[in-house]
Image: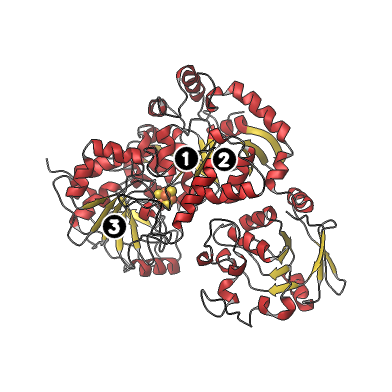
Amino acid sequence: MTPFTTCTAVAAPLLRDNVDTDAIIPSREIKSVGKTGLEDGLFAGWRYTEIGGREPDPGFILNQAAYRDAQFLLSGTNFGCGSSREHAAWALAEYGFRAVVAPSFNPIFQGNCVRNGIVPVVQAADVVAQLADEAPEPMTIDLVACEVRAASGATWSFEIGEEARHMLLEGLDAIALTLLRRAEIDAFLADDRRRRPWIYPGANG
Amino acid sequence: MAKTLFDKIWEAHRIADLGDGAALIAIDRVLLHERTGGVALQSLESAGYSVLAPERAFATMDHVVDTRPGRTDETLMPTGKNFIVATREAAKKAGITMFDIGDPRQGIVHIISPEQGIIQPGSTLVCPDSHTCSQGALGGLAWGIGSSEAEHALATGTLRIQKPGTMRITVSGQLSRGVTAKDLALYILEQIGAAGSRGLVVEYAGTAIAALDVDQRLTLCNMATELGAFTAIIAPDDTTFAYLEGRPFSPQGALWTQAVEAGRDLSSDDDACFDREWSMDASDVAPMITWGTSPQQAMRLGAPVPRTGDSPRDTAEAVVRALDYMGLKPEQEIVGLKIDAAFIGSCTNSRVSDLRRVAEILRGKHVAPHVRAICVPGSSQVRIAAEAEGLHQVFLDAGFEWREAGCSMCFYAGGESFGPQERVISSTNRNFESRQGPGTRTHLASPETVAASAIAGRIVSPAHGEPSS
Ligand code: SF4
């Protein structure tokens, strides 16, 4: 995954509360076995003029010229609620989103964001509104300083779990993070094979 | 300090503390199925990781695979074959044991794991599937995970998890004659609701639980996810050991003796503290059925559906919506309602003991002419055993379709389904809107109730179907 330190980009305002994972990626858009091929299905229900179609709806924010290259999304409370399907985070990442700024997130979705290199930034609704007012002027998310900076210079700090921050800063997925403890895991397994040999196939009975 | 059964398993698997109540936990077994397993294996490989312990990982074909006789890789679900082929190839590459189409060990993942002795008391087992909790019936800690977590477990043999809380559900007394573990599961759902155990490890305990055989324990634990639980578990006992002894993947010889010795210590200490406790008497349970679109919308068979606003756990709006979807009116009687179809199958109720009890009801009878009746054995082993006993002939003579093993119409994935507004009585675990087909109306009940209703062509009490003596 690409590490995230500081990023300056356009933020697209999608100021609705309870944007659920089915709105982010409708189940009918999940056609393949893998994690890719989801980009075109992102927000499909809102983005296109008809269900299953590909005719862009000019009213939808991501279809407007100024927001074509948006890498941040501004949204309402409880972003990512609904089914825990990870496809929602995959679709956002594949489309090119690097962060979502919202007053609150669904906890499972928030975890999925971190695992997929998207920074979930929690900011009060009035801050999100102010950032939306300044869009499409590029804003900055600084994960080193844990700060959000509007184009006007206004700055707010944000909180994120230490482990999540570490993973995002280093571009580590959870597997890479865990494999840093490989020696500890191996030692545990060696010991456990003695304690519970019946759990390990191939042990002599 | 006194410990719960869960604490003991947790501590035996804790590799490191990660702070804030999270830990790195060793995972003994990973199970996969073709709907989610292929994705996990493929994306693992594309990220450059390999499977740490392929000898402790297993995969099966159950969700997407066709269940009509003479099946191949082709499915009614338009892209289904891709899932099958991708999972088969990825499992082979990774060196994982695969219970493929045509393998006599194939079947629904939560049925074959106990059947093959993959789940063991005191072990940790994960699978990207929410009904993994079923397997806690054998005294292991088994739970459903997401796609990324499955990759993590495969690559590292561990998971980073927040320690869940605990809840003990004590069921004293004995279930009445004709009342099954399925009725008990639905009764508990009605009593404590679909969020009644949210995020908790539920330990089922008490005399009524001890009296259940392993198949019935599996049925009960299966529906813990419907309670919102992290998982369910039952302390291993002689019933457990007798069931697992000699199974293909169970430890053999001296290792088995050692495993049983260790397994005997696996119970909650007398003074262990649970975050929540709930108790009930088994004699309060009667045959149950669901009336709505959430498993908590269950009631005693014979009671009328609720009046709006009169259901303890649902808002009036939710009741109206559920009744409307189900085509029911407030206070309507459920008994006597005409059905269009009857389904025996799923990881809840499709083991050979279930099929035996159903066959007793069906023997010498025929399903009502307007009813489509389907039986899908939970595993190929179940099918083979049932056929050896001639049970399939009883089903066929009664007008049931007799299928190959799989999830089949337990859930609608884009392939085969029941029709819109069709009323189905089903031995499965979820009655969500469109779960068994777009617009399909599902009533959950025990296999006995399903069988008796199939014959009557309308919902009846299982006592109706008792063989005349
Ligand atoms: S039988 Fe149904 S509930 Fe069980 S694993 Fe299959 S789809 Fe899921």
At x 29%, y 61%, the residue is B304
User: Same chain for the residues at labels 2 and 1, yes or no?
Assistant: yes
Image quarter of the N terminus of chain B: top right
The answer to whether any part of residue B177 appears in the image is: no
Pointer 2 local density, CA inside 10 Å: few below 14, some 14–19, many at least 20: some
Mark sitting on residue B205? none
Tags 2 and 1 touching, CB below 8 Å: no
Return the residue found at the far left: B469
B442 sits left or right of B335 in the view: right
What's the amino acid at mark 1? Met
- When the figure is inspected, residue B169 is found, relative to residue A96, above or below; the finding is above
Return the residue found at the far top: B254
| Residue where numbered disc 3 is placed | B303
Closer to us: B229 or A71: A71
Across and down, in percent, residue B141 comes to 52, 37
Residue behind label 3 places its C-beta within 8 angstroms of ligand 1: no
User: Same chain for the residues at labels 1 and 3, yes or no?
Assistant: yes
| Chain label for disc 3 | B
The answer to whether any part of residue B272 appears in the image is: yes
What's the amino acid at mark 3? Ala
The part of the image, by quadrant, that contains residue A145 is bottom right
Mark sitting on residue B98? 1
What's the amino acid at mark 2? Ala
Across and down, in percent, residue B422 comes to 30, 65
At x 39%, y 50%, the residue is B407
